[in-house]
Amino acid sequence: MKFFAILLACALTCPLAVYAQEEPILIRFSHVVASDTPKGKAAERFKELAEQATEGRVRVQVYPNSELYRDREELEALQLGAVEMIAPSLSKFGPLGAREFQVFDLPFMFPDMAALHRITDGPIGEGMLHRLRLKGVIGLAFWDNGFKSFSANRPVHVPADLAGLRMRIQPSRVLDAQMRALGAQPMTLRFGEVYDALAAGVVDGTENPPSNFYTQGMQDVQSHFTVSNHGYLGYAVIVNRKFWEGLPPDIRRELEGAMREATRYASSIAQEENDRALAAIRASGKTQVDVLSESGRAAWKQALAGVSADMQAHIGADLIADIRRAIEAP
């Protein structure tokens, strides 16, 4: 009787000891880039913060470099509940029926990161993430990578230099139109296939931030890299809606806090990582790095000026106008 009384007292006064035996909630976080990219580092930072904030009640397993799923596959896996969290590039939201996210693909839309953050950190970005609920997912945050540059196996100084080249793009109608405006042939490939395609000569060039270019070893298969900063590459961290809404409210609050901190971290390291990668590309001696002057950029802007107008019906004229007003606001 005394033994059973002790057990009863422990059950009544030591609920944490009983709870600690429960299995932790598992979040499988899949992404397609290397662990040492801005997105890869931010994912690891979220894992650290989430597990610490929930005191082990949540375990985050990060799968980088397409270990689980590749590009479009991960969106389907998320909707089916095969993974709980992914961070696809904003170009890839078309299959979800969220074409407005391709506004971030418009060439020369954002003059700098400060202008970009007026959108992603403001009411326009918040509204875009909120509307994803209708697609069965929850949008948690925007994460930066950086501005893209062109690479090829020949010098790329003026728009005509891309004429006739087979250029790898993400699955985006805007990026397709961009390459065609430059006289290039757009070719949609999964990110994990790009290096082999370049090595085999299946494609001639790419557009990437320096960090993606360098961490994939593209300096071994591309002789020229032109810092054009013509477009933005960013991500949206999204979770399966059923999973997220089924979490205990206190766990969800802790995870939201961890995501806010990981997002600040992602923003703080993106430029630093790209600067470091660009220096490493130069130091490799394998790839010639050129930087467009302001007058040189003007020629590219002129060549691509019609893309935004042509894409208004696809993306939404009102959204494009709202973003431009927000960027230009004092």
Image: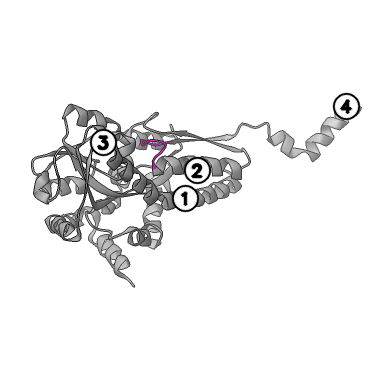
Q: Is residue 85 above or below residue 229?
A: above
Look at discs 4 and 3 and give the one toward the viewer: 3
Question: Label 1 is placed on what type of residue?
Answer: Tyr
User: Which residue is nearer to you in this view: 20 or 217?
Assistant: 217
Counting from the top left corner in percent of width and height, residue 134 is at: 38, 48
Counting from the top left corner in percent of width and height, residue 255 is at: 54, 46
The residue singled out by tag 1 in the image is 265
Q: Is residue 166 above or below residue 258?
A: above
User: Which residue is nearer to you in this view: 47 or 20?
Assistant: 47
Q: Residues within 10 Å of mark 3 (few under 14, many from 20)?
A: many
Look at discs 2 and 3 and give the one toward the viewer: 3
Q: Is the C-beta separation of discs 1 and 2 under 8 Å? A: yes
* Residue 35 belongs to the span the image colors magenta: yes
Counting from the top left corner in percent of width and height, residue 283 is at: 30, 40
Question: Label 2 is placed on what type of residue?
Answer: Arg
The residue that appears at 51% across and 51% down in the rendered structure is 261
Q: Residues within 10 Å of mark 2 (few under 14, many from 20)?
A: some
The residue singled out by tag 3 in the image is 219
Name the quarter where the N terminus is drawn. Answer: top right
User: Which residue is nearer to you in this view: 145 or 21?
Assistant: 145
- The answer to whether residue 232 is visible is yes
Q: Secondary structure at mark 4?
A: helix
Question: Label 4 is placed on what type of residue?
Answer: Phe
Start-end of magenta stretch: 30-37
Of labels 1 and 2, earlier in sequence is 2
Q: Secondary structure at mark 1?
A: helix
